[in-house]
Amino acid sequence: MKRIQKTIALSLVISMFAFTACNTDDDTVVNDNDPQVDFSADNATIAARTDIAVEGSFNIVENAYAEEAEGRSAENSLFTNCAIVTLVTDGNGGTITVDFGEGCTLNNGAEVSGQILIEFSPIIEGERNLTYTYENFTYNGNGVTGGGTILREIANTDGNPQSTWNGSIVVTFPDTEVTATRNGLRIAEWVEGVGSGTWEDNVYHIEGNWTTTLSNGFERTGEVTETLVRELDCPFLVSGELSITQQSLTGALNFGAGECDNIAIFTFNGVDYTIILQ
């Protein structure tokens, strides 16, 4: 990573997803109680891809801030030399610009390009506010635009750093004209690897709820019912579960029991569906 620090006086490639039923060959499931309501595998897959792209992009924001503004992971950065990180501080806050140029591979294998701009306020009573935006940014071949606000707690009641995100993110994909907009609340607690000096042992627990709206009119809401676990050295969530509501129908999306793999299981109407995240 090329790091530029200035102090002034004043101031997942996710190329394809396979969505296959364990107990049926159909791509669409019909609710037995309401045959007029279809459960679309295509739409569910795009929504799941959105979750992965947003989650991966947000982890980059969080680590850029933690490394630059809080001085964490100084011995072993997530960012490689193709990333130019510029920190500007003024005693009352500052900005961080992360420039990946036309293409950059991070140390966790993520392929990114474009820029991320992060602005942060002073720390008041152990908290500070951040805003961030994506500029011509891509994550593993998917376009990511928009941004949001983050309430950063230096230490929560358990003594861990915690970020509470609210925002609106739009994701585009290289193999479909359908776009996805993600809005909602995400709370990430940094539970392992704090102060170790390296990103490789970082583990986050994620709670929250959010809505994903596709440009074709499809909408899906998700609420964390079993804490999602993200190990930063794995490109996928390793465990946890979301309760998913689509077209007034409810299912569950499970990310496993702790293994770093590219499989999630969606359960709907008593049928398990395997999502291959690669």
Image: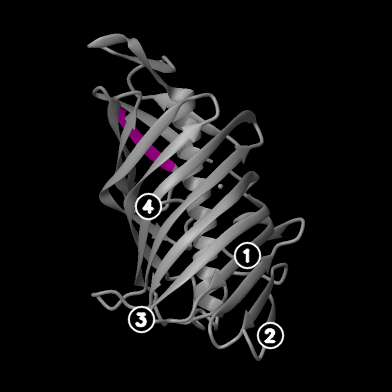
Kindly report the distance in space between the C-alpha atoms of the residues bearing marks 1 and 2.
Answer: 15 Å
104 up-or-down from 18: above or below: below
Which of the two labelled residues, at mark 3 and mark 1, occupies the earlier sequence position?
1
Tag shown at residue 65 = none
Q: Which residue is mark 3?
A: 126
Picture quarter with the N terminus: bottom right
Kindly report the distance in space between the C-alpha atoms of the residues bearing marks 4 and 2.
Answer: 32 Å
Q: Residue at x 44, y 24 (%)?
A: 41
* Residue stretch in magenta: 263-267
Q: Is residue 265 magenta?
A: yes
Kindly report the distance in space between the C-alpha atoms of the residues bearing marks 3 and 2.
Answer: 24 Å
Residue 86 coordinates in the image, percent (x, y): 68, 76
- Foreground residue among 212 and 56: 212
SS class of the residue under badge 1? strand
Classified by dominant secondary structure, the portion drawn in magenta counts as strand
Q: Which residue is mark 1?
A: 117
Label 4, residues with CA under 10 Å away: few <14, some 14-19, many ≥20: some
- Is residue 210 in view? yes
33 up-or-down from 22: above or below: above
Kindly report the distance in space between the C-alpha atoms of the residues bearing marks 3 and 1.
Answer: 23 Å
Label 3, residues with CA under 10 Å away: few <14, some 14-19, many ≥20: few
Q: Residue at x 62, y 69 (%)?
A: 79
Label 2, residues with CA under 10 Å away: few <14, some 14-19, many ≥20: few
Picture quarter with the C terminus: top right
Q: Which residue is mark 4?
A: 185
Which of the two labelled residues, at mark 4 and mark 1, occupies the earlier sequence position?
1
Q: Are marks 3 and 1 in contact (CB under 8 Å)?
A: no
Which of the two labelled residues, at mark 1 and mark 2, occupies the earlier sequence position?
2
